[in-house]
Amino acid sequence: MMKNKRMAQSLRGYGLTFLLVTGMFFTAGRVQAAADSVQLNFKYTVVQGTCTVGVSPASVVLPDIPLPAKMPTDYSGYTADGPKKGFPFDVNLTQCSGASGTKKPRLRLTGNHDLPAGTTTALDKSVLFRDSSSLSEGVGFVIYQSTTPVVGSSGNFVCDYNAPCSNSARNTITIPGVPGNTLISDTTVHMSANVSRGNQTGPLKAGTLTATVYFEFDYN
């Protein structure tokens, strides 16, 4: 009988030991289930497309026009040798980035139009560029989206984006070859400038003629 009692105590001891070990395993399981977690958020903004705008040459200097000059008042460009194609220059678009969406790339032109006080022609006020520091009168610079001669037509003239413009003239400058597409590579827009009387019928006055214009790239 005593032997059986010791065996029972020994079995209860083993059983107790087993239960303790089992409890340790359950405890370890709870620690693993409560491990820390971390949240990672993603954010990305698709920016509106843009380009760096530059011009070459930086300054356009036209040859002197001797007076008396018979300059037509039909928006034809004029040089020292008479009506000729405009003086060429380039607008360079580089480092383009972003997206266009459904819009088209374009250039907008703005500048000064310091014309005589009596000027009433809306087209003159939008296409003849002239700084107030100019000494000559009766003329202004005109900008063409073209390097070919323009005679008697405003079809290739570029109006000031913020000024009234006739239906036949351009209110913005189109980017050749990429209608409706995002501009991702460097692009050059060939343009020209010249001197024009526009519809000015007042007398010509000798002196310097200067103008400052600005080109801005955007999608519209």
Image: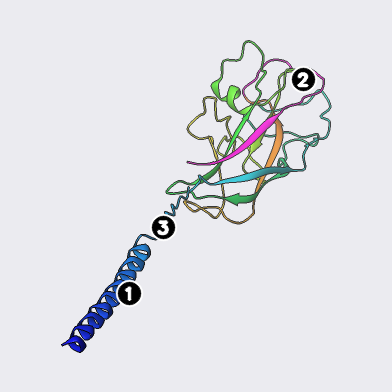
Mark sitting earlier along the chain (1/3): 1
Image x and y of residue 61, in percent? 80, 35
**Residue drawn at 30 percent across, 76 percent down:** 17
Total tally of numbered discs in the picture: 3
- Identify the residue at image location x=71%, y=28%: 212
Mark 1 packing: few (<14 Cα in 10 Å), some, or many (20+)? Answer: few
Residue sitting at x 33%, y 68%: 29
Quarter residue 185 falls in: bottom right
In the image, the segment drawn in magenta is: 199-220
Kind of residue at badge 2: Ser
The image shows residue 48, relative to residue 186, as above or below, that is: above
Point out the tag, 3 or 2, that comes first from the N-terminus: 3
Give yes or no for contact between labels 1 and 2 (Cβ–Cβ under 8 Å): no
Percent of width and height locating residue 90: 70, 46
Q: Tell me the tag on residue 36.
A: 3
Q: Secondary structure at mark 1?
A: helix
- Magenta-drawn stretch contains 210: yes
**Circle on res. 134:** 2
Secondary element under disc 2, as helix, strand or loop, is: loop
Q: Position of residue 128 (x, y in %)?
A: 65, 26
- Judge whether 22 appears above or below 193 on screen: below
* Residue 182 locus on image (x, y percent): 51, 53
Instruction: Give the overall secondary structure of the magenta segment.
Output: loop
Residue 9 lies within the magenta run:
no
Q: Which residue is mark 1?
A: 21
Q: Are marks 1 and 3 in contact (CB under 8 Å)?
A: no
